[in-house]
Image (cartoon, rainbow, N blue to C red):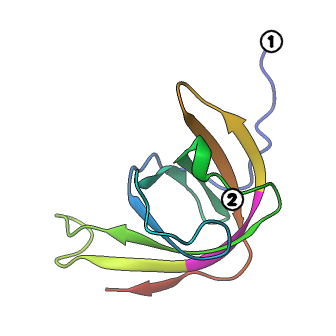
Amino acid sequence: MNRPERRRYRRLRLRLPVLLVGGGDTSPPVSPWVTGNVSAGGMYLHVPRERAPDGQTELSFEIQVPAGVGYSASAGKIKGSGKVVRTDPLEGETVGLAVEFTNPLALEF
């Protein structure tokens, strides 16, 4: 049975490194946090289970964007903040975090 799409924003499947700069676990990452997808309203992160923050945790982050043909001649960062709205167990020792952006994103290129 087809279910109606409930998402407000189109998701882009992107695997980009994420640096946590506030909230949750702020120690240097042992395993990198990476995006699974990103939209205008939020992102889905893949994180090691032992480093996953609790639900409803507020996070400040930087997404590292490499240079690439067709979108930017130089590397840059996307800075923002968000709230963990869902945690999903994934394969192995990984957890998926659904993060809703709480403020507009800042681009630095």
In which quadrant of the rendered view does residue 73 lie? bottom left
Describe residue 67's horizontal placement relative to residue 99 as left or right: left
Mark 1: secondary structure: loop
- Left or right: 15 in relation to 97: left
Residue linked to disc 2: 99
In the rendered view, tell whether residue 109 sits above or below residue 20.
Answer: below
Give the residue at x 69% y 51%.
98
Q: CA separation, marks 2 and 1?
A: 28 Å
Front-most of residues 56 and 106: 56
The picture places residue 101, in percent across and down from the top left corner, at: 69, 70
Mark nearer the viewer, 2 or 1: 2
Residue 1: mark in rendering: 1
- x and y percent of residue 31 in the render? 40, 50
Relative image position of residue 72 (x, y in whole percent): 24, 74
Q: Tell which of 95 and 80 is nearer to you.
A: 95
Where is residue 61 shown, x and y percent of the image?
Answer: 54, 74
Is 89 placed left or right of 107 in the picture? right
Crowd tier of the residue under label 2, counting other residues whose Cα lies within 10 Å: few below 14, some 14–19, many 20 or above: many
* Range drawn in magenta: 80-84
> What amino acid is at disc 1?
Met
